[in-house]
Amino acid sequence: MGYSTDVVGAKSSSTNLLVRRIICYTVLTLFAIISLIPFFILIVNMTRQSNHIQKGFSPIPGTYLLKNFMTVIENGDWKMLRSLFNSLFISSFTALLSTYFSALTAYAIHVYDFKLRKPVFTFILMIMMIPAQVSALGFVRLVAKMELTNTFIPLIIPAIAAPSTFFFMKQYMDSALPLDIVEAARIDGSGEFRTFNSLIMPIMKPAIAVQAIFTFVSSWNNFFIPALILDMPTKRTLPIVIGIIRSADYAKFDMGAVYMAIGISILPVAIVYLILSKFIIRGIALGAVKG
Amino acid sequence: MLGYIQIGPEFVGLENFETLFAADSDLMKYFGNTFILWIMGFIPQIFFSLLFAAWFTDIRLKLKTGAYKVIFYLPNVIMAAAMGMLFFTIFSQSGPVNTIYMDITGAKAPYMFFEHEWSQRGVIALINFLMWYGNTTIMLMAAINGIDTSLYESAQIDGANPSQTFFKITLPLIRPILLYVLITSLIGGLQMYDVPKIITQDGQSVNRTSMTIVMFLQNHLYSKNYGMAGALSVILFVVATVLSILVFAMVKEREPKKKKAKKGGNK
C-alpha cells in the first residue's frame, strides 16, 4: 500500500541513517580509544627501564622490552611460566564447570515445579550477597583440615556453585527459553538429560559464552582466595606472582618487570575472549524460539 | 606455637557493634564514600552500556561492530589492582593528562588529582566505569539478541522510530537482565577494594574521603582484629541484602500483570 509515496520517505530516511551511523561510529571510536589508553601505557612501560618509569610517563617506547621479558621469565623465584600454566588450568576448569552446572541449576529452577523452588532461589541469591572476605577465614580453615592446601581442588570445585552465574542463566532463561520447547521435547520422547544437553544448551549458547568469559577472567585475576591457599612456589597463580614482583624490596624493585608481568598475564585472556566472542552470534537463540 | 599462650577469643557480646555504631565511628562515612564512588561509576556505565547494546543490535543501523565489542570489553581483562596502577600513572603529576592540561591551559603547576576529594573520586569512578561498561554492554547485548527479531521488523513496518523501538520493545523485554546488572553491580560496588586502595594509597589520602567499607574491613583483618572484622562483615551482609531486596521490589513491582497474561497464553 502506498509504494509511490514511500520513495521520498525512503530517501530521507537513508540520509538520516547515514547521519546516525556517523554519530555512532564517532562515539564508538572515541570510547574504543579511551579503552585502549591503559593498554598503550602498559605496552610502552613494558619496554622501559624501571628508573625511567618512576621518573614519569613518556609515550616513546624504550629499549628494554626483551630485557624486561627475560627478567620476568628467567627469575627462578617467580616461576612465571609455571604460574601461567597453573592459572590457565584453574581458570579453564572453573569456567567450564561453573557455566555447565549453573545452567543445569537454573534449568531445574526454571522448568521444574517443586515445593522448595522459591526458597531455594532466594537462598542462592542470599549467598551471592556475601562478600568473599566474609567467609574466607572459615573456608581456609576447612581446606587446611581437609589437607587440600596447595592443591587446585579448593579453587576449582567450589566454583561449581556460582550464584551470580546461576542468576544470569536463570534471568536469561526467563527471557529466552519458553517452556513449550521442553514440553515439545518431552512429547517427542526425549529424556530429561538429553533435552538439557542437546536442546537447552544450544539455546543457552550466548549466555554460556558470556558467562564463560566472565568466569574465566574473574578466576584468572583472583588474588584473594588463591593467596590464602597456595604458598608453594610451584603452585602459585599469576596474580600471586605479580603481587610478589610488586612487593619486592627497594633494592630489587623493578617497575619494568611489574608491567611486563601484567602484560604477560593479559595476553591469554585476550585470546580466550577473542575465541569465545565468536559464539555470541545474533540469532542462536532466535532460531530455537521461532519454531 | 611453643612458648606462647593463646589468649582469647573472648566473648564480648555486642561490644564490637557498639564500637562500630558509636558517634565517633567513621562507619557511616565509609558507607557514604562507597555509595558515592559506586553511583558515580554506575550511572554512566548503565547509560552507555544500554546505548551501545542498542546500537550494536540495531537491525537498521547494521554497524560493523566486531572490533568495538572486543575493545570495549578489554579493560575488564586487566586486574583491578593493575588498572589502578595504570591510572595512577596517567593522572600523576608528570603523567600524560597533566602534560596535556598544562599545554592547553598554560598552567604552570600540574593539577594534583589525588589531593582533591572530588577529582580523586572521579578517577576511581572512571576506572570502575571503564572496567565494567564493556562487560555490561555484552551482557545487555546477549539479552537483546534473545529478543525475537520479528518484533523489531513489525515495529519498523508500523513506522516506529529507533527510540520508540528501544523504550517500548527492548527495555521491557530485557528487564530481567537489567535487574541482574543492577544487583551484581550494587554488590560489586559494596565490595569495592583494589582500585581505591591503589589510588588513595591505602585510603589515607585527602582525609579518607575515598576509603570504602571493605578497605575498612580489610584494615581490621590486617591488624588481626577479627572480632571487629566479623561484626563489620555482618553489617555489610545485612546492607547488601536490604539493598538487593529493595531493588527486587522496585523492578518486580510492575510485572505481575504481564506474568499472569503470559501464563494464560501458554495454556
Image (cartoon, grey):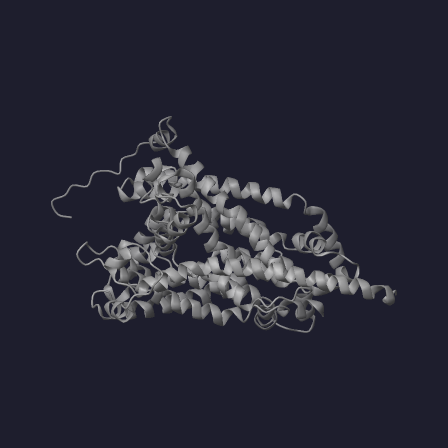
> Which residue occupies the foreground of this view, B153 or A276?
B153
Determine whether, in the image, residue A55 is placed left or right of residue B80.
left
Asked if B9 appears above or below A219 in the picture, the reply is above
Residue at 64% over, 69% down:
A283
> Which residue occupies the foreground of this view, A276 or B50?
B50
- Residue A122, visible in the rendered structure: no
The quarter in which the C terminus of chain B is drawn is: bottom right
Q: Position of residue A67 (x, y in %)?
A: 25, 69
Kindly give the residue lying farthest to the left in the view shown: B3
- Res. A148 image quadrant: bottom left
Determine whether, in the image, residue A137 is placed left or right of residue A116.
left
Kindly give the residue lying farthest to the front in the view shown: B106
- Res. A73 image quadrant: bottom left
Asked if A7 appears above or below B12 in the picture, the reply is below
- Res. A48 image quadrant: bottom left
> Which residue occupies the foreground of this view, A171 or A32?
A32
Q: Position of residue B206 (x, y in %)?
A: 35, 37
Q: Position of residue A142 (x, y in %)?
A: 32, 54
Residue at 55% over, 42% down:
B245
Number of numbered labels in the structure image: 0
Residue at 58% over, 45% down:
B248
Asked if B14 appears above or below A205 in the picture, the reply is above
Q: Position of residue B67 (x, y in %)?
A: 52, 67
- Residue B83, visible in the rendered structure: yes
> Which residue occupies the foreground of this view, B148 or A251?
A251
